[in-house]
Image (spheres, rainbow, N blue to C red):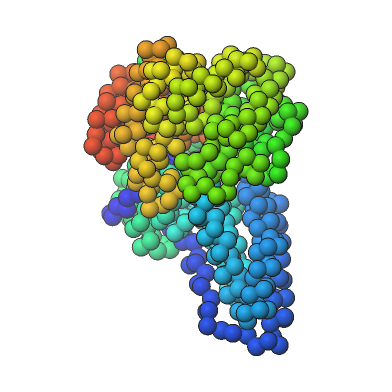
Amino acid sequence: MRDIQGVGVSAGLVVAPVRRMPDPVREPDAGVVLPEDERAAAAARLVVAADAVRADLEHRAESASETGRAVLEATALMAADPTLEATATGLVTDAGLTPERAIWQAANDVAAMLASLGGYMAERSRDVEDVRDRIVAELTGRPAPGIPHSDVPFVLVAHDLAPADTATIDTAVVRALVTVEGGPTSHTAILARALGLPAVVAAKDAASLADGDVVLVDGAAGRVVVDPDDAARARAERLAATGPRSFDGRGRTASGTPVALLANVGDGAGAVAAAAAGAEGVGLFRTEFCFLDRTEPPTVEEQVAAYRGVLEQFAGKKVVVRTLDAGSDKPLPFVTATDEPNPALGVRGLRTVYRAPQLLEDQLAAIAAAAGQTEAEVWVMAPMIATVDATQAFVSRCHAHGLQTAGVMVEIPSAAICADEILTEAAFASIGTNDLTQYTLAADRLLGDLAPLNDPWQPALLRLVDMTCRAGERRGRPVGVCGEAAADPALACVLVGLGVDSLSMTARSIADVAAALAGATDEQCRDAARAAASSPTAAQARAAAREHLPHLADLGL
């Protein structure tokens, strides 16, 4: 057996043969110059190819899941982008580039511009490159990028996965994901958790895997075992035979200590899925969906209708609403600037109030109105809180709108360091581990090269969580976690051992996390937490914690 180590982002054990994504489309020759009398026809071929790609993506969207449909439709719009098409055809007619070279060059310029913005926009650069590759393949008669076809289940291995690829994954045949690039918060990682697929990212040596290689993917440990022995295969098959887990609606440890297991949702459809999964409530309601793809803010009435669609699914249950988290990876034309040199450290989250105070006032009014029209227990929290005075100002505005349970997100190290003072003012804290990790380790969470630094098992992160929880205990304030770390069954036990009393995650992860907690006593959770937080490295933290949680291996977690 040979081990390949990466970063585990979605738990589970699977044994299956490898199928690799097709080789990337090669860069077209830049040295060919078309005669002037051929350029018009070549430009027309480019337009036809782009339209064919758009039509293919729209056709695939018709049979995709709801999430997949949205991704494919967005990619189809990019293929039909008039600015991209005009730039590319101009390179053909004016400079004599071949159509494939022209779309390659035009798309690269757009991708580079998006990458320079960082965050969410940088991730969108992968979409542009995917459209570029599809149009080049159409022009040159090569196979388009995409998931390989197979009649038997397989482990999908790729350098990286574009959103348009992951959106069409058929979980009946694709049993696990392994990528050479990517990180814990990459699109691949998030989708794997949403689909319930074991996944390992940032596995550099996976580039050596070939079609037909039999591998065991351990999504919890971040390991890919090549040619596993009979015992390893038998264990994976035994776990697979138990079928998917269910959740009874009550998160608790083996000692009976309650731990609220909540869902992260971004719209009404997500709320329906979370309720169906038995979520005890919503720990993170992302409200950005009301604001994205608009040139002006939504009205109060529009926001009320949108929020009510989520709140109505959780009558009598807690729903934690995060106010608008614009900026950085979610730029909005009516509030964020386009010329910030470092958007991740710029005017984002609650800081947008400096530029557009009425946005917050209108949103709080809408949240209060929607809360009054439903039976959900509505809490409100602000993103990107760094100081006590920002906390005081936010809590004051919430109270002015009749929203009495006002809290903060702990995403910036200063908020954890000053948690005692902040939690004197705020009713609760919710730790956003994605951003807290990247700010603590000074590592862009979307860069695959920095995936090891963005590991939520980093001891520095765990110590900040501990610091926040101790402050919560002293002030009598609840502290939850709503980052992707909450979906890791082993890390969930550690977080509870540190003092976290609620965990919010993608709905598909709730049952696994519930099983992990139900098999661990309070003492085991505390021992695992102490061992992890006192470790020198993330890998050692993970290993040390699991030594105190032996039941996870039996659960395949």
* Residue located 43% across and 63% down the image: 211
Point out residue 503 in the picture as x, y percentages from the top left corner: 47, 26
Q: Is residue 400 above or below residue 210?
A: above
505 relative position to 365: left or right:
left
Q: Is residue 126 above or below residue 184?
A: below
Q: Nearer the viewer, residue 219 or 345?
A: 345
* Residue located 32% across and 37% down the image: 458
* Quadrant that contains the C terminus: top left
318 relative position to 199: left or right:
right
Q: Evaluate whether residue 340 shows in this view.
A: yes
Image-quadrant location for residue 99: bottom right
Image-quadrant location for residue 394: top right
8 relative position to 374: left or right:
left
Q: Nearer the viewer, residue 42 or 400?
A: 400
* Quadrant that contains the N terminus: bottom left
Q: Is residue 223 above or below residue 476?
A: below
Point out residue 329 in the picture as x, y percentages from the top left corner: 54, 44
Point out residue 354 in the picture as x, y percentages from the top left corner: 57, 32
Point out residue 298 in the picture as x, y percentages from the top left corner: 72, 35
